[in-house]
Amino acid sequence: MTIATVMIHGTAGFSTSRIAQLRLNVGRAGVRMGEDVVTIMAAVAVFMCAHLIEMAMWGLLLMALGEFHGFATAFYHSATNYTTLGYGDIVMSPQWRLLGPLEATNGMLMFGLSTAILFALIIRLAEMRQGGKGVFG
């Protein structure tokens, strides 16, 4: 499952890069703050979709393992694990209980990856607005 989520996030990162490049090509990125906010919002939307797909995949895995019979409950449980919220109102059987912390670890890594890519995008856009000069120096 971790490999699948990394692949989805890789696709999201590539898509974000393409969106930024397309907006740059038409003069909509790296020029004005308002336009850059639109670029960042598009990137956030792509990563949000990636996270939701990954939570759904974890939920489907939990259903396939027989932990849950309905997708809504499986998705809810997956979302609380993936986001490390962990309400604990639904507990898995001892046989599969370790999947909870594994999913939480996977979610933290994917949120970290999203954050890193978004931060790099924000820095790059700010540098472009400043004429290529470094943001921090």
Image: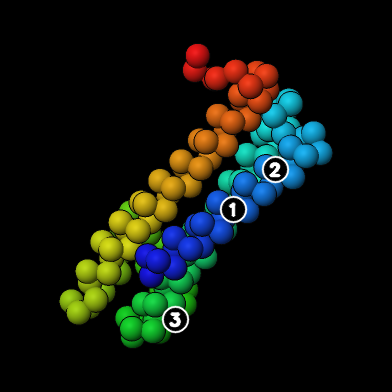
Give amino acid for label 2: Gln
For the question of whether residue 118 can be seen, the reply is: yes
Q: Which mark is residue 97?
A: none
Q: Secondary structure at mark 1?
A: helix
Judged by depth in the image, the label closer to the viewer, 2 or 3, is: 2
* Percent x, y of residue 47: 55, 52
Classify residue 125 as left or right of residue 48: right
Q: Secondary structure at mark 2?
A: helix
- The residue to which callout 3 is attached is 70
* Percent x, y of residue 63: 39, 81
In primary-sequence order, the first of circles 1 and 3 is 1
Q: Quadrant of residue 132?
A: top right
Q: Is 35 situated above or below 100?
A: above
In primary-sequence order, the first of circles 1 and 2 is 1
Classed neighbour count for the residue bearing mark 3: other residues with Cα under 10 Å, few (<14), some (14–19), many (≥20): few
Residue at 35 percent across and 58 percent down: it is 106
- The residue to which callout 1 is attached is 14
Q: Quadrant of residue 76?
A: bottom left
Q: Residue furthest top?
A: 137
Q: Secondary structure at mark 3?
A: loop
How far, Cα to Cα, is label 1 from label 2?
A: 10 Å
Classify residue 2 as left or right of residue 15: left
In primary-sequence order, the first of circles 2 and 3 is 2
- The residue to which callout 2 is attached is 21
Give amino acid for label 1: Phe
